[in-house]
Amino acid sequence: MGRRVRGWTTCIGAVAAAALLSGCTVYDVARLAGDDTHGRDNGTAGSALARDYLIGQLKPIATGLNTAATGDAAYTQAVPGGTNIVAVIPGTDLADQYVVVGAHYDHLGDSCPPGTTCTRDTIFNGATDNAAGVAAALSIARSIAAQPTRPRRSVVIALWDEEEDGLLGSAYFVQHPLVPLARTVGYVNFDIQGSDLLPSLRNTSFAVASETGGTRFQDMVRSAIGDQSLDTAVLSSVFGQGRSDYVNFIGAHVPTVFFTDATGPCYHTVDDEIGVVDFDKLDAQIATSLAVTRDLADTADPPAFAPGQPAATFDDAVAASRIVNRAWADRGRFSAADQATLTRIRADAQRIVAEGRAAFGSADVGTLLGDSAAFVNILTHGTCSGFLSASAQARITAFRQAKAAVLRAGR
Ligand SMILES: [Zn+2]
């Protein structure tokens, strides 16, 4: 296990002392996804190291949400097998209403058996999944704490444990909430951020499930997206495939938006390291989600949970068609079989859009759902660096060479 470093400073101070790092977000990802946290599996020393860092970041800007405990423990919620991190920035005139901003900080750990020296990389660093998402949540907390006007509603920062074990940390929270969920106007979830699925999708990201807050919430999310050059496609909840903590909040009837870059070829491999993180993209994602969070915290007209929405809509088809057409530029990167799948998906999306909104029906919903699953599947094929832009690939190669030298030298 890694050496336990005590007394980490907050990001601002540490960055001033670390000339190689350009900002808090880079620093957060470097700390969380560094080899010394050994992949942040719940219940490990590496997880505790990450947690100490995160609590250290939150303490100057937010209060511990667990009022049954004191000191650092007030920033934690024990869950069976793990520990959630929970903090709050108190609101002003609507302080008894809440916005929850969440991201899981756990990941898959280290496959090197304890007591063994491994000369290949065995650490699942989870830089995009989900150190970058945690960095986004922290960045929102820092920004709101630094803004001259306090939010009207209280903003909860929740960093989940055991997401990789079946969304367990967030499930425990909604079963044992530390703030009333009936007075929670929205949940903002991050899982996999700063990730490029293909060079052609470098400027593409996803905002999933905002229809859970009806057209009011969709309008808020679209407005925040419209202020950024990043093309964040608004998609219905089902396109998140139930694969992140957002589903637990929908289950608790809280309007929810899930910001994600979906799963690419680096997903759940030891190569998901800081070198693959697109920090320019992450900055735009933070700006978008900060605007949503601040709007939720301040609006006189908050969204209400909107049950019974259709699984998929014509707007989903329009977004899917736009994304697949963009990815078409990279079709040469896929195998022949996957190119055939991509060709079929593209034709389906083009047909559904061409037939128009009035013709959209349940058969189209089925086609869209099947095709989106197939698209996500072919994107995860291939090697991690093989699907990245030339600059990202050069970054990863340099990073791997440096890391291999460290491993050869022993750790
Ligand atoms: Zn994740």
Image (spheres, rainbow, N blue to C red):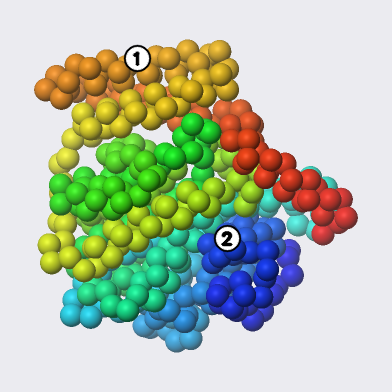
* CB under 8 Å between discs 1 and 2: no
Q: Is mark 1 within 8 Å of ligand 1?
A: no
Horizontally, residue 69 falls left or right of residue 207, namely: right
Residue shown at 62% from the left, 41% from the top:
392
Q: Alpha carbon of mark 1 to alpha carbon of mark 2: how far?
A: 40 Å
**Residue 252: where, in percent of width, then height?**
25, 56
Residue shown at 61% from the left, 71% from the top:
15
**Residue 179: where, in percent of width, then height?**
28, 72
Quadrant hosting residue 170: bottom left
- Which residue does the numbered mark 1 point to in the structure image? 347
| Amino acid type indicated by mark 1 | Ala
Q: Is residue 37 visible?
A: no
Q: Nearer the viewer, residue 39 or 232?
A: 232
Which of the marked residues, 1 or 2, is nearer the chain's N terminus?
2
Residue shown at 27% from the left, 28% from the top:
318
Mark 2 Cα-neighbour bin, 10 Å: few <14, some 14–19, many ≥20? many
Quadrant hosting residue 172: bottom left
Horizontally, residue 312 falls left or right of residue 195, namely: left
Q: Is residue 292 visible?
A: yes
**Residue 84: where, in percent of width, then height?**
45, 67
- Which residue does the numbered mark 2 point to in the structure image? 26
